[in-house]
Image: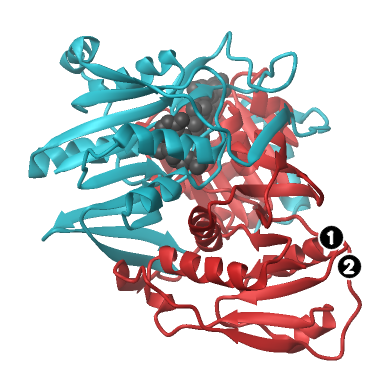
Amino acid sequence: MILAVLDDSPAALDMLAFAQSLGQQVDVATFGGGDVDDLAKRGVRTLHRITHDELADCAPAASGDALAQLIEHLRPDGVLAVSSDAVTEAMAHAAAIAGLPLATNCVEVTTGEPWLLTRVRGGGMLLEEAELTATPALLTIAQGVSGDIGAGPVESCEVREFFPELTTTQARVVERASRGAGMTLATAPVIVSGGRGVGSADGYRVLEELAERLGGVVGCSRVATNNGWRPHSDQVGLTGTKVTPDLYLACGISGATQHWVGCMDSKVIMAVNTDPEAPLVRRATYAVIGDVHEVLPAVLAEINARSKT
Amino acid sequence: MEVLVCVKRVPAPGAKVPLTDDATDIDTRYLGHTIGPHEECGVEEAVRIVKAHGGSATVLAVGPPEADEQLRYAIAMGADRGVLVDVGAAELDPEATAAAIVHAVGDTSYDLVLFGTESADASHYQVGIRVARALGLPIVGGIKGIDIDDGAARLRREVADGVEVYRLPLPAAAAVKEGLNLPRYPSMPGRLKAKKARIDVVPYTPEPGGLRKVRLRQPNDDREEAIVLGHGADAAPRVVDVLEQIGVIT
Ligand SMILES: Cc1cc2nc3c(=O)[nH]c(=O)nc-3n(C[C@H](O)[C@H](O)[C@H](O)COP(=O)(O)OP(=O)(O)OC[C@H]3O[C@@H](n4cnc5c(N)ncnc54)[C@H](O)[C@@H]3O)c2cc1C
Ligand SMILES: Nc1ncnc2c1ncn2[C@@H]1O[C@H](COP(=O)(O)O)[C@@H](O)[C@H]1O
């Protein structure tokens, strides 16, 4: 049996389909929650619902304890989990407790002895082929990976509550604040992003103006963050945010791999750069060769001129 | 406050990530090395905490003898001393890395142990958690804010819909993310101090864990070359044509 650890994100259902495509019976585990009707439609016969009053207010170590206990109890052949930060962290704790290896961010998996897998490194810079020798095999599956639905619908999905005994409860949430509404890098349909080529903090004004005009937000490269031109929350890339807007307009950004992996899944990438050989210029959908501070004002002027007629 | 920061020596590739002929590693002959941005923020935070609360900051790397360079960089940023766990050149799996760190820490007691949330090259997302568990320390990952007061660490992290603050009694550990602070560039006196600083070398023979790297491969990139819309300001009409065509002009 394979245990699929899901959260309530839509991506979790892709992960479930992927787990089912491996050809074994798949049970689901959740930290509370789980829509049994939907799971039955997806061919899941058993939902193991980890239930504990304190779980939501404890540090991820507690979720890891609970998961390790469930794994010990069920003894599955493999545990496949979604790769959200919270679930990955719980899986790492469970692996540490159980003394088992853990392969994170997998995109291809073949069960067996050993399990053969391909995992993503550096946010997509490289793929690693690896062997995982352990039972159960613990893996997290990269976002965006899915499978053909492996199992037809079943009549019903039985819920089995699992009550863990939590010992590591001393680390707790003491404060929660919700982020104000508003567009973020992760949700904006348009990102006007600037790198070293923008030249200064002031230089971003024209990027802001264009972003506003296009209903988007400003992003940046790590050079801009390190120079103190922009806050880190604007940074796109491996150690910043991964973005998928309709349009990523990259101004004065060379396209180092660590930046590229953060923007490569945008629908359209347009690069503005003085250097026609810059890697991002070559890999973009469209490119303009020129100085940011000449091109962007001209684009704004053209948009304004057209909207008047 | 005794603070330990674990840093990894990683290649710093540019636009291409070259592989060795047998495709088991990044070919670093023509590349520089660095410590990952998350860990750099860890070093910066340790230096600030020590400045505010007294004590000292130790940096530790598991890797080849050349990781000396990354430890000295961290010392140039303001850390006090370094520990190099010499395991040779081969990259270790996360269980072996964690065991090497635990071995080197021994019974030294630190009030706070910092890691990156994930290493910049291998992205296993687990070494910090394994070490903290083995040392019996509470840990939370993804941390972008640390306050030390009253025998506890208050750790802030961003979640999908906002922020959460955790309170961990000291001693504790945290796996941090870039954005925690703006790391300083090493000063001239810092660099001089780093040249002479003491680095303890701990030899260690790792036992491999259950995850074995077989080979690396480049993701396929069958993109076509970009369509060049023009040069300088003259390109504006074609740029706006494209913006209209993809429907982003509102
Ligand atoms: C482990 C690790 C993680 C990293 N994570 C990230 C990350 O998350 N995000 C990130 O961005 N980087 C990251 N980096 C850094 C990355 O390697 C690059 O250093 C960085 O992306 C370069 O930023 P840049 O393109 O702005 O600067 P540069 O590489 O210096 O490029 C500037 C570009 O601007 C062009 N230019 C100059 N003047 C003009 C002008 N007037 N008009 C138009 N174009 C102009 C130049 O031709 C050049 O192409 C990471 C590095 C490492 C080692
Ligand atoms: N070789 C190493 N030497 C020192 N610290 C390491 C090493 N590998 C990983 N770490 C630490 O563990 C964190 C998480 O690494 P990983 O589990 O590989 O993603 C890193 O950010 C480092 O702080």
Q: Position of residue A145 (x, y in %)?
A: 76, 55
Image quadrant where one finds the N terminus of chain B: top left
Residue drawn at 55 percent across, 59 percent down: A91
Tag 1 residue: A147
User: Of B167 and B248, which appears nearest the observer?
Assistant: B167
Q: Is residue A69 above or below residue A233?
A: below
Tag 2 residue: A150
Q: Find the distance from the CA under tag 1 to the CA under tag 2.
A: 7 Å
Disc 1 vs disc 2: Cβ atoms closer than 8 Å? yes
Q: Position of residue A277 (x, y in %)?
A: 67, 17
Judged from the image, the secondary structure of the residue bearing numbered disc 2 is loop
User: Of B238 and A84, which appears nearest the observer?
Assistant: A84
Q: Taking A95 as reference, is A225 left or right?
A: left
Q: Is residue A194 above or below residue A191?
A: above
User: Of A238 and B121, which appears nearest the observer?
Assistant: B121
Q: Chain of mark 1?
A: A
Q: Which of the 4 image quadrants contains residue A280?
A: top right
